[in-house]
């Protein structure tokens, strides 16, 4: 909006100044959007094809110093310097896309003697269809009356595929006190990079011919007026270094491998923190951004393949599966994928094996492929040594969220549930490796994994895990030989000019991300879910008339029972409240306990096979520090007015009556939880009671028992939502809550250091994890009853 306001102010200031004629070029106001856009129709600048540097001179080159023009074009701004004998003229043009397919522009032209003799142009351009372009223009000059100019352009072969944008017919008609004779134009691209354009003024019986030859980013052309006898008059020649690639007459697009660097860390949601009028955004890529980038690479004709070098991506197992699916679509488009590693861990090798055409390993490299393991510390005896008793209230034996504090070792129920989880993870990894490399392996995948890890590169080669042992400096030569490419680039190729005119109509759907532990209050985006913030985002999306549906992306182990219910209420209103609209939940790495609570009222729930979900149960924690206070000689005294005013104090054990209060509270919340699940999932309460009990499930098992509907990620969620909302068009994702302020993106390490987001304790990992667990529980304040899964899986 600020850009539009500035543009309007510029236009008004320019219009109030006197003017003189702008030189007319033989190009249509409705069809011209490249080098001469700022001269012909400034609104076309923001269409995006005009960027670059241009040089226009007299065709005989004899008056090079006396007659020339320089063009400096950007997306929304252009500057033109015209030299005409001893006179110099300046032109500044501004342009802005107002709404879809609608552009506004303004230009101010003045002589070197000052603004008092200036010209002004205010123009509009709209391209509602790929076959139709319309323009309107107001020109006010110093020497003449105001001129109004209307333009129309048609692509008659828009339906014909290859020829759709190679022929354009257009006309301009001016009004100066009365309507003038129209001027007609023909633009054609006879072959790639060979353009022939004609302009015809029937009133003056004049023809203008333009021939242009194009290389990918260099164009040269001539503009030749013809007199009434069709004899050529003095014309112009021009050269253009374009910011975008054009179809070329002699140089077909080169094919490259793209050295893709998406990580190392790939997050569900960027961390954000407000800072005055700014909001600081961490620099990691999100999973959705990576999926989008891979899709763009698959459409880029210059990209023949992707190279991943030494990338042990840090993200969830479920996130890697979404990336795997996107890479498979990239391969299905006929493109290649190569991985090179010096050392690689379990899951990143699994990803590579599932989609790679080639996997290379350093001669001294290693592959840590050995299956999955999970170790947990149990602190009951350590805490007891210091005089701390943990009272773990839980709805069921499978609700083990606080067991590491209250138990001496893993319980049978906890072991059973976790073994089933890592078995599902292992099965998925085996399936992925089999998909991509079964024909190259020396033995079955299960035996290959049992023989791991592969610390000697030669062993990995002998097992068929990699295709060759090479050094990093040999990678490019190998890829050139195998795939006949021009080379490897680490940046995207220059984008191509737009050949289509209109943006397809889209439907808007909201994307709301819920990442981290759930607590009351406001969210810390990318880190925790505040019930106030998330509920408001859902409410705003529901009440926004332009939004046709909501995707709620959940990556949360849960947290506060009360906060979870506040959020779930907003989901229920999306079903039956005012301005109800469909909601699809897409689960990330984990959506368990409170994370499942806020998901279960969605119209559809999707998860990956290895998503950790379920954990429908409740825990409550209290601490008795009586022995600790006795050891450190701290004495407590108490006065109270109510029988249970000191319920849960730390300096004495709870009575059985007090414990019974907590047990009833937990039973009530568990009953409410199961009833909401039954309502949301359309299940009998008895069935929910059977599959709940605090038990965690993998996504694939959750589908079998009815806790989720489909296996899939973002892309599947979008398709499911389109079906629910009866959306036939492409969709545009709109992030909620809507950001207010100016974004500043910092590298992850910088934003963490500056904002002290990460607590780097310097302790060993096992002890540091305990500090982080304490930090997690500190988010819930005085709340004693929680819906949370405390496990964090490191791959």
Image (spheres, rainbow, N blue to C red):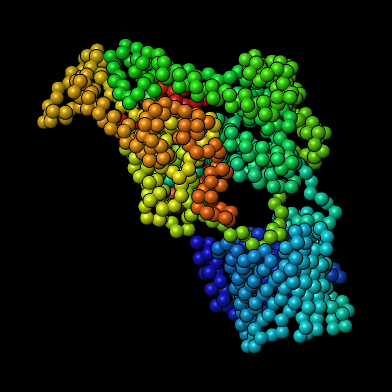
- Report if residue 751 is visible in the image: no
Q: Quarter holding the C terminus?
A: top right
- Report if residue 464 is visible in the image: yes
Q: Position of residue 295 (x, y in %)?
A: 64, 44
Q: What residue is shown at x 16% (from left), y 30% (from top)?
A: 645
Q: Is residue 18 left or right of residue 512?
A: right
Residue sitting nearer the eye, 174 or 731: 731
Image vertical order of residue 326 relative to residue 386, above or below: below
In which quadrant of the rendered view does residue 80 lie? bottom right
Image vertical order of residue 602 relative to residue 81, above or below: above
Q: Position of residue 129 (x, y in %)?
A: 64, 65
Q: Is residue 144 left or right of residue 661?
A: right
In which quadrant of the rendered view does residue 714 lie? top right
Q: How many marks?
A: 0
Q: What residue is shown at x 77% (from left), y 68% (from top)?
A: 187
Residue sitting nearer the eye, 4 or 526: 526
Q: What residue is shown at x 73% (from left), y 57% (from top)?
A: 242
Q: Position of residue 90 (x, y in %)?
A: 66, 70
Image vertical order of residue 316 relative to residue 411, above or below: below
Q: What residue is shown at x 54% (from left), y 50% (from top)?
A: 722
Residue sitting nearer the eye, 247 or 709: 709
In which quadrant of the rendered view does residue 185 lie? bottom right
Q: Position of residue 429 (x, y in %)?
A: 60, 25
């Amino acid at each position: 909006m600020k850009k539009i306001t500035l543009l309007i102010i510029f236009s008004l200031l320019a219009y109030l100044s006197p003017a003189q004629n702008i030189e007319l070029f033989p190009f249509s106001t409705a069809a011209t959007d490249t080098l001469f856009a700022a001269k012909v129709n400034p609104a076309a600048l923001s269409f995006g094809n005009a960027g670059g540097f241009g040089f226009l001179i007299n065709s005989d080159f004899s008056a090079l110093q006396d007659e020339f023009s320089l063009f400096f074009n950007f997306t929304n701004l252009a500057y033109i310097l015209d030299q005409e004998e001893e006179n110099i003229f300046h032109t500044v043009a501004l342009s802005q896309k107002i709404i879809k397919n609608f552009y506004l522009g303004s230009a101010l032209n003045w002589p070197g003697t000052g603004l008092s003799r200036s010209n002004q142009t205010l123009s509009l351009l709209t391209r509602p269809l790929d076959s139709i372009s319309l323009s309107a223009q107001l020109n006010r000059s110093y020497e003449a009356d105001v001129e109004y100019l209307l333009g129309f352009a048609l692509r008659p072969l828009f339906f014909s595929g290859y020829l759709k944008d190679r022929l354009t017919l257009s006309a301009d008609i001016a009004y100066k006190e009365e309507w003038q004779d129209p001027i007609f134009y023909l633009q054609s691209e006879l072959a790639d990079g060979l353009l022939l354009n004609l302009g015809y003024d029937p009133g003056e019986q004049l023809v203008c011919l333009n021939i242009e030859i194009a290389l990918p980013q260099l164009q040269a052309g001539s503009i030749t007026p013809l007199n009434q006898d069709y004899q050529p008059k003095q014309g112009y020649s021009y050269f253009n270094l374009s910011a975008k690639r054009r179809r070329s007459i002699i140089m077909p697009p080169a094919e490259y491998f793209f050295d893709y660097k998406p990580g190392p860390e790939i997050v569900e949601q960027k961390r954000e923190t407000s800072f005055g009028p700014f909001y600081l955004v961490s620099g990691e890529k999100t999973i959705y951004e990576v999926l989008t980038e891979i899709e763009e690479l698959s459409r880029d004709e210059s990209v023949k393949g992707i190279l991943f070098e030494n990338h042990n991506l840090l993200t969830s197992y479920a996130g890697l599966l979404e990336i795997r699916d996107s890479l498979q679509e990239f391969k299905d488009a006929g493109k290649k994928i190569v991985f090179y590693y010096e050392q690689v861990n379990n899951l990143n090798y699994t990803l590579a094996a599932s989609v790679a055409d080639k996997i290379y390993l350093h001669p001294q490299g290693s592959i840590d492929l050995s299956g999955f393991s999970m170790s947990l510390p149990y602190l009951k005896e350590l805490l007891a040594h210091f005089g701390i008793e943990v009272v773990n209230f839980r709805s069921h034996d499978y609700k083990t969220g606080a067991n590491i504090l209250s138990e001496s070792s893993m319980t049978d129920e906890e072991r059973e549930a976790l073994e089933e989880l890592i078995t599902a993870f292992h099965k998925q990894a085996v399936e992925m490796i089999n998909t991509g490399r079964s024909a190259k392996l020396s033995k079955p995948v299960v035996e290959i994994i049992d023989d791991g890890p592969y610390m000697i590169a030669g062993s990995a080669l002998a097992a068929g895990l990699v295709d060759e042992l090479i050094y990093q400096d040999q990678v490019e030569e190998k890829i050139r030989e195998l795939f006949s490419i021009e080379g490897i680039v680490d940046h995207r190729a220059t984008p191509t000019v737009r050949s289509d005119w209109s943006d397809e109509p889209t439907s808007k759907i909201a994307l709301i991300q819920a990442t981290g532990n759930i607590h009351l209050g406001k969210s810390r985006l990318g880190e925790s879910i505040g019930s106030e913030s998330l509920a408001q985002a859902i409410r705003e999306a529901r009440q926004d008339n332009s939004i046709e549906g909501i995707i709620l992306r959940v990556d949360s182990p849960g947290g506060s029972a009360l906060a979870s219910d506040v959020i779930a209420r907003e989901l229920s209103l999306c079903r039956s409240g005012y301005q109800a609209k469909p909601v699809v939940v897409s689960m990330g790495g984990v959506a368990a306990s409170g994370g499942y609570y806020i998901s279960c009222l969605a119209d559809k729930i999707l998860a990956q096979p290895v998503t950790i979900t379920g954990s429908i149960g409740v825990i409550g924690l209290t601490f008795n520090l009586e022995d600790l206070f006795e050891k450190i000689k701290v004495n407590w005294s108490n006065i109270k007015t109510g029988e249970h005013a000191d319920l849960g104090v730390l300096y004495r054990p709870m009575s059985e009556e007090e414990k019974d209060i907590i047990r009833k509270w937990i039973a009530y919340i568990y009953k409410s939880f199961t009833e909401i699940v039954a309502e949301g999932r359309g299940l009998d309460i008895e069935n929910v009671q059977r599959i709940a009990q605090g038990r965690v499930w993998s996504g694939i098992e959750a589908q079998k028992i009815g806790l989720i509907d489909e296996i899939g990620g973002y892309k599947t969620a979008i398709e499911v939502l389109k079906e629910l909302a009866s959306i036939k068009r492409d969709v545009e994702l709109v992030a909620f809550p809507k950001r207010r302020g100016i974004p500043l993106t910092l590298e992850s390490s910088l934003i963490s250091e500056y904002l002290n987001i990460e607590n780097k304790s310097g302790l060993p990992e096992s002890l540091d994890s305990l500090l982080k667990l304490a930090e997690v529980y500190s988010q819930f304040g005085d709340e004693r009853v929680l819906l949370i899964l405390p496990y964090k899986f490191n791959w």
